[in-house]
Image: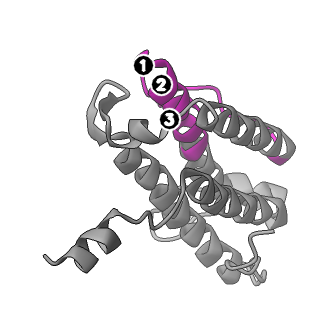
């Protein structure tokens, strides 16, 4: 590797703040998907053995906020499948907003050096802080895409995936 390559390798591609904004943009799009779902279908509609979208969103709620809290506190949080499910779409949206706030609060406690720290999230998933955050984002995109399939099957135009405002 020559000197120029070394300098390029040392430059940062994305800042922690840019990564957070990327994730928050995805969270805004997912929130829009929740909003456009008809209430009944949000809880009941499914295709091909997939779960209703409410169950997918519940999984996202059980991961992002609690996962970030565990990352910054260092205190293991058990992933709980049986956590109480909200009974209305509005309650899901309220919890979504609370979780987004928790992500932002916890993010402000991260130091740049924390991202490559090894962790065992929820006492079972080994990796680094950055690999866990990437999983949170990827998992959200994956489930949101399933929600898009449901919406299209219901004849509802989903929000534009690229409009992260």
Q: Which of marks 2 and 3 is in front?
A: 3
Badge 2 vs badge 3, beta-carbon distance below 8 Å: no
Residue at x 47%, y 25% (from the top left corner) = 70
Would you place residue 80 above or below residue 63 in this image? above
Q: Does the magenta stretch include residue 120?
A: no
Residue under numbered circle 3: 111
Horizontal relation, residue 82 to residue 87: left or right: left
The span shown in magenta is 60-89
Residue under numbered circle 2: 70
Q: Does the magenta stretch include residue 73?
A: yes
Residue under numbered circle 1: 74
Q: How far apart are marks 2 and 3 (CA)?
A: 15 Å
Q: Foreground: 117 or 70?
A: 117
Q: Foreground: 78 or 153?
A: 78
Q: What element carries label 1?
A: loop
Mark 3 or 1 closer to N-term?
1
Residue at x 83%, y 39% (from the top left corner) = 94
Q: How far apart are marks 2 and 1 (CA)?
A: 5 Å
Mark 2: few, some, or many residues within 10 Å (few <14, many ≥20)? many
| Image quarter (top left, top right, bottom left or bottom right) of the C terminus | bottom right
Mark 3: few, some, or many residues within 10 Å (few <14, many ≥20)? few
Is there any visible trace of residue 160 in the rendered image?
yes
Residue 162, given in percent of the width and then of the height, sits at: 69, 79
Residue 85, given in percent of the width and then of the height, sits at: 66, 33
């Amino acid at each position: 590797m020559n000197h120029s390559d070394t300098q390029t390798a040392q430059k940062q591609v994305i800042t922690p703040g840019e990564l957070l904004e990327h994730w928050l943009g995805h969270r805004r799009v997912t929130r829009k998907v929740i909003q456009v779902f008809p209430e009944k279908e949000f809880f009941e509609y499914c295709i091909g053995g997939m779960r209703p979208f409410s169950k997918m969103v519940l999984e996202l709620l059980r991961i992002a906020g609690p996962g970030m809290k565990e990352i910054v506190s260092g205190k293991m949080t058990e992933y709980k499948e049986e956590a109480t499910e909200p009974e209305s779409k509005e309650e899901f949206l309220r919890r979504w907003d609370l979780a987004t706030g928790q992500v932002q609060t916890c993010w402000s406690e991260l130091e740049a050096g924390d991202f490559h720290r090894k962790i065992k999230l929820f006492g079972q998933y080994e990796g680094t802080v950055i690999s866990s955050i990437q999983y949170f984002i990827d998992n959200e995109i994956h489930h949101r895409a399933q929600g898009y399939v449901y919406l299209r099957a219901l004849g509802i135009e989903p929000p534009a995936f690229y409009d992260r405002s």
